[in-house]
Amino acid sequence: MHSGGPPTAAPNWLRTHTGVALRAARCLAVSIGTTLLSAVILVTLALGIGMRAGLANVIAVVCGIVPSYLGNRRWVWGRGGHSSLRREVAPFWALSLAGLAASTFAVDRVGTLAAHWSGVARVVALPTANLAVFGALWIVQFVVLDRVIFGARSPQPSLSVSTQSREIAA
C-alpha cells in the first residue's frame, strides 16, 4: 500500500539484475529465432529431400550461427564496429560448434531410431532432439557470452578482424 509520500527508488538488487535480465531475454529471443530457422532447414533437408538427419542438422545449425552471432553481438550486447577475431568470433564459433557436435549426435541418433516412424512423428522428433540439446546448453551459452565473449571489459584497444588482416598482409 502506498503511503502517499514520494516513490522510493527500485531496490538495489533490481537495478543490478535488470540489465542481465534484459540481455537474457534478448539472447533468448535471438536463440528462438535461430532455432526456428534451423528447425525449418533441418526438417526441409531431412524429410523434404531425404538427407540423413545428422548431415541435415549440421547444415541447419551452421546456417543459424551467423544470424545468432550478429543478433547477440549487436542487439543483445550492443556491440558495433569490427568484431575481434580472437575475443569474439573464434570463441563464439567454438561454442556454437560444440553445440553443433552435441546436437548432431542427438539428432542422428533420434533419426536412426525414428527411421520407420511416420513423417509427422519425425517432423516432431528431429527438431525436438536439436532443441533439447541447445536448450540444455543455453544457460551455459548465455553465461559465456555475457561474462567472457561480449561482457563488459575495461576499455582497451581491440584487434579487429580488418586490423588483423592488414597486419597479416604486412
Image (cartoon, helix red, strand yellow):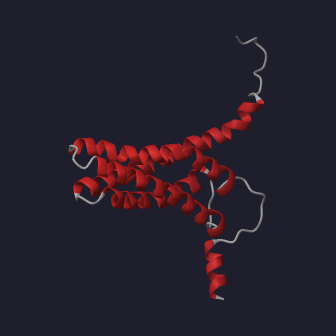
Whole-percent x, y for residue 20 in the image? 66, 41
Q: Where's the N terminus, which quadrant? A: top right
**Number of labelled discs?**
0
Q: Nearer the viewer, residue 73 or 121?
A: 121
Describe residue 18's horizontal placement relative to residue 112 as left or right: right
Residue in view at x 58 percent, y 56 percent: 73
Q: Residue at x 48, y 59 (%)?
A: 65
In the image, residue 114 lies at what x, y percent? 28, 46
- Front position in the image: 11 or 32: 32
Q: Position of residue 129 (x, y in %)?
A: 39, 46
Quarter where residue 55 is shown: bottom left
In front of the other: 60 or 133 = 133
Q: Is residue 40 above or below residue 124?
A: below
Q: Give the residue displayed 36% in from the left and 54% down from the top.
A: 108
Q: Quadrant of the C terminus?
A: bottom right
Q: Is residue 74 above or below residue 166?
A: above
* 114 lies left or right of 140: left
Give the residue at x 44% y 57%.
64
Q: Residue furthest bottom?
A: 170
Image spot of residue 152 (x, y percent): 72, 53
